[in-house]
Image (cartoon, rainbow, N blue to C red):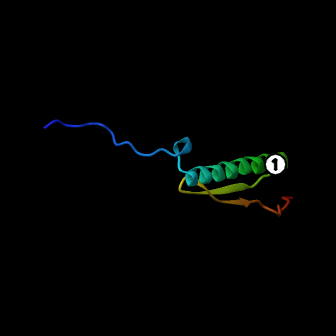
Amino acid sequence: MACNNDRLSLPRFSGGRPAKMTKNRDKQIEKLEKLVEVMSTLVSQEFTGHLKINFSQGGIGRVEKFEEILKLSSN
């Protein structure tokens, strides 16, 4: 009996990805672009706090900004 090592031929979607996957990827790219834009704005405004970025399954889940609003002057 001969061994057949041919791969299974699966149907391909446009661009090689299902439409839902492409839409989710587009949303992730938009979120990443928005995050970079916000970070650039914070740098130009001399932001002195920190950001906490949570990722969920490879995408941006939530972004939190922490900044000290009152600095006590040392005499």
Residue 29 % position (x, y) = 66, 48
Q: Is residue 72 above or below residue 27?
A: below
Type of amino acid at the residue the image marks with label 1: Thr
Q: Residue furthest left?
A: 1
Give the SS element for disc 1.
Answer: helix
Q: Please name the residue shown 38% across and 42% down the image.
A: 9
Label 1 CA crowd tier, 10 Å (few <14, some 14–19, many 20+): few
Q: Is residue 63 left or right of residue 6?
A: right
Q: Position of residue 74 (x, y in %)?
A: 84, 58
Q: Position of residue 70 (x, y in %)?
A: 83, 64
Above-or-below relation of 10 to 3 = below
The residue drawn where x is 78% and y is 61% is 68
Q: Which residue is mark 1?
A: 41
Q: Nearer the viewer, residue 30 or 49?
A: 30
* Residue nearer the viewer, 69 or 42: 42
User: Is 44 placed above or below 53 here?
Assistant: above
Image quarter (top left, top right, bottom left or bottom right) of the C terminus = bottom right
